[in-house]
Every structure is written in structure tokens, then in C-alpha cells.
Amino acid sequence: MTDFTAEKAISRAYMADFDQAAPSERFNRLKAHTSPDFHWRGVHPFNRQPSAKAAMQAFWTPLLNAFSSLQRREDIFFAGLNEIDGFTATWTCSMGHFMGLFDAPWLGIPPTGKMAFLRYAEFHRIENGKIAETALFCDVLSVMAQAGVDPLPPQTGAAFIVPGPMTNDGLLLSSSDPDEGKTTLALVNRMANSISKANEVLQGKSKTYLTPQQEMSENWHDDMIWYGPHGIGATYTIDRYITQHQAPFRTQLADRVFNGHVARFAEGKYCGFFGWPNLTVTPIGGYLGLPATGKPADMRVVDIYRRDGDKLAENWVIIDMLHFLKMQGLDVLERLNAGVR
């Protein structure tokens, strides 16, 4: 059995302690559970923060001031050794929603006085009994849409509060069979290699050709579900995924460069990774309903997968869309705060 009991306990103790504390006490709780050289990553406009204090000031305090009675609605939790550093460091992953009453402005987004949901994926690197590093991705655009100030044209996929795993088994609180995690990681890597091969065909570097349906069916169930970020949306079944996400991504973005991942690990039937950035692409017109910019732009992406048997069944994706758009000259938050919609 693979035993990440200690690392899971550290991560869960932090979440319980921090989430249950009064807003005025949360910095002390964060500091208590993190190492002296702790550093934090977040989506734009939070970006890199060099300490617990900086992360608190940049992200947590504004969020807690805006969302009353904030709570964590967790759907997935697992741990694993990071493939990127040779399976040396242990990371944990928590995914779900932060939910609260949207009672005050956040990043210039007008409050609704109603419940609001902020999708999140939070990764922690555990070292010497403390959290040494955190990456927290969240879907800011989804909150803008809930507040009625969606800055993008209609998306190709569906928009809704994203659910957790269909199997309701996403919280891996105890030990798991190591062979299950190895199988999951191998499948995700095989799927990623299929994408790389398809990209080589698009770039004229390879003549090997599979139809999109053939490529997808090698690694995905026909009734797969892909939960994309706001701006793209969610899709169901291989055919609709191809129509509503893959085709726009491959035909409206050029010069795709894979930059690698910071962490990639699996436990049981779940796998997750993130990069900083994962990809660099150049919009050539039409993507997200926007015109071509001709400017390379980075995509910081989280992918979390659920394996069912020998294929992938569900995939939760968060992309730092605000950063991607800002690199193309569209600063969504600046426009919002200037009163431009």
C-alpha cells in the first residue's frame, strides 16, 4: 500500500484549521502550517507570492472580505509523489468550490448578495512536516458570470456549477493500492503523448494520422465528461468534446509549445497536474469568440482526471484565463474597474 498518511494529515489539518478560523485569525493559522520559506502561486491578478503574509494579503483577505461565511466544498482529495522531480516530493491536491455569500466587491466584481461559487484546485508540497509550497488555481471568470458581468462572448460548452466525480469516491483519505496510481498515471501520460503526436501532425512534423475520434477513443470512454473553465464550458461525450473544445483549440490557436509541468502525480483512480505555464499558443482568430492577436500567450492549466477501468472518464480543468487574455492585451479586470463591459 502507498502510504501518504502523514502528508495528508498535514494538508487536512491546515484546511480544517484555516477554514474554521475567524477571518482575523486566518493568517496566524496559515503561518502555523507553512514553512519559513513558503511560497504561493495563484491565477492572475494574484500570481506569485513569496510568503504566507503576502499570499494572505493578495488573495485570502480580499476574498474573505467579499464572501461572507466562506466554506470549502471539497469534491476531490488525493496525494502522490511528483513524477516531475523523479518521484521525490510529496504533493496533495484538493479540488472543489469555495462557497459564500457574495456581499462585497471582489476584484471590482459587483456583489450579488447571493450565494456564489468559486471553483478551485489547491496543490500543496509537503516537506519536513509543513506546507512548503502552494499552487491555488481558481476560476475568476465564473464569478463574473454569476454576477452578471461576463466579459466574453457565449461559450461553446455548457455553464453550470461543476459537480464532483460521478462515482462519489474522490476523497482519498486513507491509503491506496500503489498499482492503481501507477496505472492511472501511465494512462494520463499515454493520453498526453497522443496529444503531442496530434500536434506534430498539425505542425507538419509528422504524417501519422488518426481522426480526432480515433485519437480520443484510445484513452477516453465514449461518454467522457470534460469540465472546462468559464469561457469554454463543459462538454459531454467524445463527439461533443471534439466539436465544443478540441476543434476550436486546435484550429484557432497556432504554434503550440508545451512548457512542462511543475507537479504531476496520481493516487488510486485520480491524477492531477499543473504547469507555470503549461502551454504557449498564438491566437489566430475565433478562439473564445475573439479576433486574432498574433501574440503568443501562456496558459497556466490544472488538469484533474478520474480513470474508470482502462480509460479516462472525467476531467476537471481550470485555466488562468485572465492571464491568458492579459498577455493578448485584454485586461478583463482593468476594463471592469474602468466601467467598460
Image: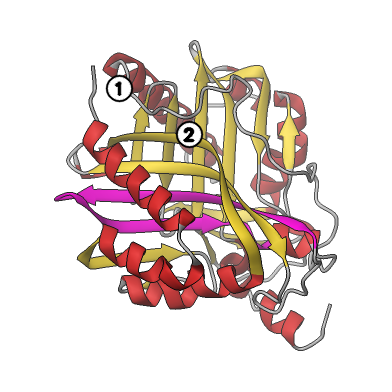
Contact (CB < 8 A) between labels 1 and 2?
Answer: no
Q: Is residue 74 above or below residue 268?
A: below
Q: Is residue 102 left or right of residue 299?
A: right
| Residue at image mark 2 | 197
Q: Is residue 63 left or right of residue 7?
A: right
From this viewpoint, is residue 279 visible?
no
Quadrant for the N terminus, please. top left
Q: Is residue 297 above or below residue 240?
A: below
From this viewpoint, is residue 74 visible?
yes
Query: Separation of disc 1 and disc 2 at Cα?
Result: 35 Å
* Residue 182 percent coordinates (x, y): 31, 21
| Residue at image mark 1 | 175
* Residue 50 percent coordinates (x, y): 31, 74
Q: Main secondary structure of the magenta part?
A: strand
Residue in view at x 28 percent, y 58 percent: 33
Which of the 4 image quarters holds residue 53? bottom left
Q: Is residue 338 magenta?
A: no
Q: Is residue 126 magenta?
A: yes
Q: Is residue 144 left or right of residue 266?
A: right
